[in-house]
Amino acid sequence: MGWRDDNKPIGLSGGTGALPVWVDYMNRLKLTPVALPEPEGIEWLWLENNSGKLSNERCADARYLPVLSAYLPEEASSCAVGLYQQDRAREQNQQRRSEGLEIPNGEAVDSDNQENSDGSNGNDAESRTDTWYDRAVEWF
C-alpha cells in the first residue's frame, strides 16, 4: 500500500489505510467466547519448565500446565521442596506459638522427630503413609 500505478505517493500507510479497514471489520463481527469442556483425567499442576517436576507458582521456571492423571510427576523441583519446607516450618512455628511453646533459636521444629508435650510421638498412621507426592498435591 502506498503507491499508485503512476508511481506517485497516495499518502496512505498501514496505519492510515489498512488498520482502519481491519478495525471496522473486527468491530462488525459478533464474537462469542469459546467454552470448551475440560476432558476427564486432566489435572492442572505447577511444573518446572524443563524438567517436568512438580513446582510451585512462586518458582521462577514454573508453568501451570494440564497433565494426564495417569502420568502425574512424582518428583518435585528443588525450588518447590524449599518453599514447601519453609511453609511447613512457618506453620509449625505458628502452631508452637499458639500452644505457648518456645521456638528454639527461631528454627523450624520437625514435628515428625519431636515428641509432643504429652509424651506421644508426632507420627500417626496417616503421616507415616503420606508420600511427598501426597503432601505436594495438597499443598499445590
Image (cartoon, grey):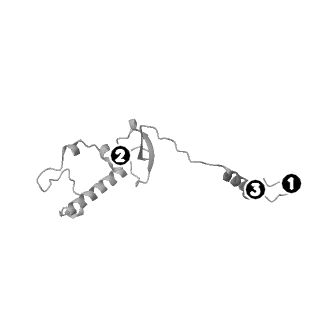
Cα–Cα span, label 2 and label 1? 65 Å
Q: Position of residue 21 (x, y in %)?
A: 73, 53
Give the residue number, with chain letter if any, for mark 3.
Answer: 17
**Does residue 49 appear anywhere in the picture?**
no
Looking at the image, is 92 positioned above or below residue 76? below
Q: Position of residue 13 (x, y in %)?
A: 76, 57
Looking at the rendered structure, the secondary structure element under dot 1 is loop
Residue at image position (38%, 46%) is 54
Cα–Cα span, label 3 and label 2? 53 Å
Q: Which mark is in front, 3 or 1?
A: 3
Give the residue number, with chain letter if any, for mark 2.
Answer: 76
Q: Quadrant of residue 74?
A: top left
Badge 1 crowding class, 10 Å Cα cut-off, few under 14, some 14 to 19, many 20 or more, is: few
Amino acid at pointer 3 = Gly
Tell me, yes or no, whether the two marked residues, 3 and 1, touch with CB atoms within 8 Å: no
Q: Which residue is nearer to you in this view: 113 or 31?
A: 31
Q: Position of residue 85 (x, y in %)?
A: 29, 53
- Considering every residue shown, the one lying at the far top of the view is 70
Badge 3 crowding class, 10 Å Cα cut-off, few under 14, some 14 to 19, many 20 or more, is: few
Looking at the rendered structure, the secondary structure element under dot 3 is helix
Looking at the rendered structure, the secondary structure element under dot 2 is loop
Q: Which mark is in front, 3 or 2?
A: 3
Looking at the image, is 134 positioned above or below residue 93? above
Residue at image position (70%, 51%) is 25
Q: Earlier in the sequence, mark 3 or mark 2?
A: 3
Looking at the image, is 58 positioned above or below residue 44? below
**32 relative to 48 in the view: left or right:** right
**84 relative to 33 in the view: left or right:** left
Give the residue number, with chain letter if any, for mark 1.
Answer: 7
